[in-house]
Amino acid sequence: MKYRCNRFIISCLLPCLFFCSLAFISILPAEGGAVSITTLDYPASPETLTVGERVPIIVGIRYTDMAESTLSLHIAYADFPPRFQSGSDVTVSGSGTYQFPPAEIMVPASYSIPSGWPEYINEWHLTAEVWKGDRLRAEKDFTLLVENPEKKPEVEITSIEYVIPPDTIAVGEETLIKVHAAYSNVAAGTKIEAILRDSTGILDTGLSRGHSGSGEVTFYMKAAPRTVGSWRLEVTLATVTGSLNYGDKMSFRINVV
């Protein structure tokens, strides 16, 4: 009778123990859990960065059913070693969200020229990675546009020859204006345009032959004043390469009597 009673008690307790164990297991965080990158803040195209500039990358994550774990953020390079330069760690458990402190990186000269962009702007390919120990749990690729000033095309007015006060010219008298310019890093076949203006509009223009690399060019332009007084003029320069224009401008005055 005693043996039967014990068997009855055990048979009643077994289902309870089974369901209690299920309930206990269900509230424990999963050993692996899940991690995803939810936000990635960085200077996106068309914004450009300069070689040597420091820039913060801000990464936000969501984690679910994590046993207590240390998650590490790495900003990884795709273009060149070292594999990653910056990052930080956080210890999490359960489920929630977290934003890592800004991971500051220094912009190098990159190696890939993006299609449709000028040759002095390069692509820098990176990946935001979240690791748990030696296991990669989440990643997201992104690209920065890097401007290399040493290769940026420039056109600069070096000097202008004109009738300098107190010398004067008369109303209607045509005068020669010589514009000297220097150019650098221009692509082969680039033509340089000069435009002479006053308050009434464009007075004369000049277009050079095709140039490449660095050098100097002079424009010879003519104009005649229409009224007496201080005649304000302006010269602007630009390279003519598709829709991309880089240049310089300078204003000056001629006394008209």
Image: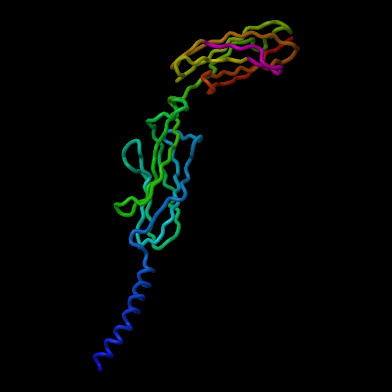
Picture quadrant where residue 123 is located = top left
Classify 165 as above or below 70. above
Please tell me which residue is depicted at 36% across the width and 75% down the height of the picture: 19
Q: Is residue 250 left or right of residue 19?
A: right
Picture quadrant where residue 75 is located = top left
Coloring applied to the structure? rainbow
Percent coordinates x, y for residue 191 in the rendering: 51, 14
> Which secondary structure type mostly characterizes the magenta part of the structure?
strand
Q: Pick out the residue farthest to the right.
A: 227
Observer-nearest residue: 241 or 173? 241
Percent coordinates x, y for residue 51 in the rendering: 42, 33
Observer-nearest residue: 138 or 174? 138
Percent coordinates x, y for residue 230 in the rendering: 71, 16
Percent coordinates x, y for residue 6 in the rendering: 27, 88
Q: Pick out the residue farthest to the top.
A: 173
Does residue 207 show up magenta in the picture?
Answer: yes
Please tell me which residue is depicted at 50% across the width and 21% down the height of the picture: 154
Q: Is residue 198 left or right of residue 19?
A: right
Count all numbered tags in the image, as a single digit.
0
Does residue 2 show up magenta in the picture?
Answer: no
Q: Is residue 249 left or right of residue 215?
A: right
Q: Is residue 99 left or right of residue 202?
A: left
Observer-nearest residue: 122 or 150? 122
Picture quadrant where residue 199 is located = top right
Q: Pick out the residue farthest to the bottom.
A: 1
Please tell me which residue is depicted at 39% across the width and 54% down the height of the picture: 35
Q: Pick out the residue farthest to the left.
A: 3
Which of the image's four quarters has the N terminus?
bottom left
Q: Which stretch is magenta?
A: 196-208
Which of the image's four quarters has the C terminus?
top right
